[in-house]
Image (cartoon, rainbow, N blue to C red):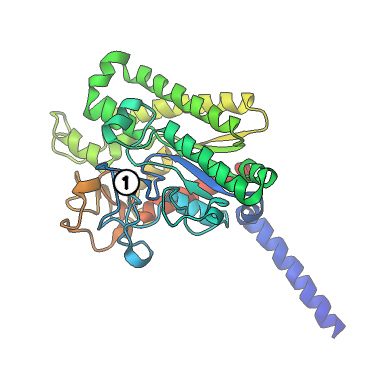
């Protein structure tokens, strides 16, 4: 009997070692991160825009088609988004709720929420166009949430939650889409795309410093995607006379602009990392994995990577992607759900990239 006990104990010790060795990220996660707080645009909006009179809403069918119970929650996708996968990977909870969800409880707040607002950006003109929440408003809601958390668990525990939380920032794409490409009149003030990007990044840096001042110590900052590969931009670009006229190919110049922005963002992140004492600030490269999914769709199980699942997949998004539109039968075969946003499958691969490359640094 004793020998069997020894053998069983040895087996579990070896098994535990193998789990820690081969799955180090999963071992990191649940114990060291208290919550996830997200700020930015539609890429992390869990439904905050449902409560605003704006066209930038995803609380109608076919959005949410593949979400549990097929509910259009306000997420700009057919199902879950990257922050949902992130909180699940961290062992915190299955979904990251919207702060403005009327069903949100004080207990829900303890493990994080999204303050994101679809259509938002780093430029006030972007926010004014969309009639949504800017980062200042999102920060004020965070302060309000902090007061609620302190009333629930006390100041000391609340400060500990914030210190050990991961803060996610995902914004900037709308600024480039509207002010640099679709409605470029704003460029006359800045003179060039590069100068405009400097303006955006200065605003972003100030926001990160503001979060740090409020107690944030683990901050993940997403860069820009390959904007020239968004189905909307592929469609618009195909109308302009060029050697790719009427062809569905990525806009190379817009992708180059995104790379330029991301390079500058990495410099800002490096500077912040060296100046914000005790903080971990990490750049989340979403450009590379999304471009790889666009260029090598079969590698990820996709059949279509330059066209959305909703409607024609060329221009539809927000109010134009609605119950009157036909959708593809199998969204897991599509990288994009509408003309701008990823499918649940696309977000899943993106979150996995973040898990592998960023979470070990942020959570250790």
Residue 219, image x and y in percent? 56, 37
Report crowding for label 1: few under 14, some 14 to 19, many 20 or more residues within 10 A (C-alpha): many
User: At which x and y percent is residue 151?
Assistant: 61, 47
> From the viewer's perspective, is 347 left or right of 21?
left
Is 255 rendered above or below residue 355? above
Count up the numbered dots.
Answer: 1
Q: Position of residue 307 (x, y in %)?
A: 24, 48
Residue 4 is left or right of residue 206, and the answer is right
Can residue 292 be seen in this snapshot? yes
| Residue furthest front in the image | 151
Residue that mark 1 sits on: 341
* Residue ID at (33%, 30%): 175
Instruction: Work out which residue is located at the far right of the displayed protein and give it.
Output: 2
In the rendered image, which quarter is residue 233 located in?
A: top left
Q: Residue at x 25, y 58 (%)?
A: 61
Q: Is residue 54 above or below residue 59?
A: above
Q: Position of residue 271 (x, y in %)?
A: 57, 23
Q: At 32% across and 64% down in the image, what residue appears?
A: 70
Q: Quadrant of residue 224 in the image?
A: top left
Give the secondary structure at mark 1.
loop
Q: Is residue 193 rendered to the left or right of residue 360?
A: left
Left or right for 57, reference 313? right
Residue at 38% x, 46% y is: 48
> Looking at the image, can residue 166 be seen?
no
Where does the N terminus fall, quadrant-wise?
A: bottom right
Taking 191 as reference, is 225 above or below it? below
Residue sitting nearer the eye, 86 or 109: 109
Q: Quadrant location of the C terminus?
A: top right
């Amino acid at each position: 009997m004793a020998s069997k006990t020894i053998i069983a104990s040895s087996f579990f010790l070896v098994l535990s070692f193998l789990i820690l060795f081969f799955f180090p990220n999963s071992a990191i996660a649940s114990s060291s991160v208290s919550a996830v707080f997200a700020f930015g645009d539609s890429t992390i909006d869990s439904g905050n825009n449902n409560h605003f009179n704006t066209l930038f809403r995803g609380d109608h069918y076919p959005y949410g088609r593949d979400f549990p119970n097929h509910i259009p929650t306000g997420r700009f996708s057919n199902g879950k988004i990257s922050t949902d996968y992130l909180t699940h990977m961290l062992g915190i909870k299955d979904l990251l709720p919207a702060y403005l969800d009327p069903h949100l409880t004080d207990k829900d707040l303890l493990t994080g929420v999204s303050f994101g607002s679809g259509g938002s950006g780093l430029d006030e003109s972007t926010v004014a166009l969309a009639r949504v929440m800017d980062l200042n408003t999102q920060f004020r809601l965070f302060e309000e949430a902090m007061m609620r958390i302190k009333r629930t668990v006390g100041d000391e525990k609340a400060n500990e939650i914030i210190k050990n939380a991961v803060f996610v920032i995902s914004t900037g794409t709308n600024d480039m889409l509207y002010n640099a490409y679709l409605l470029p009149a704003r460029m006359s003030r800045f003179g060039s795309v590069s100068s405009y990007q400097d303006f955006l990044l200065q605003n972003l840096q100030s926001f990160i410093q503001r979060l740090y001042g409020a107690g944030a110590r683990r901050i993940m900052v997403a860069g820009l995607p390959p904007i020239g590969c968004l189905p909307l931009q592929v469609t618009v670009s195909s109308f302009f006379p060029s050697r790719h006229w009427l062809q569905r190919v990525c806009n190379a110049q817009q992708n180059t602009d995104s790379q330029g922005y991301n390079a500058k963002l990495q410099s800002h992140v490096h500077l912040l990392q060296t100046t914000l004492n005790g903080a971990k600030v990490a750049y989340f490269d979403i450009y590379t994995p999304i471009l790889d999914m666009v260029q090598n769709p079969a590698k990820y199980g996709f059949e279509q990577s330059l066209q959305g699942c909703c409607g024609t997949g060329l221009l539809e998004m927000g109010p134009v992607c609605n119950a009157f539109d036909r959708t593809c039968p199998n969204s897991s075969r599509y990288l994009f759900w509408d003309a701008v946003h990823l499918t649940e499958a696309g977000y899943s691969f993106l979150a996995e990239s973040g898990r592998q490359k960023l979470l070990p640094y942020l959570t250790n």
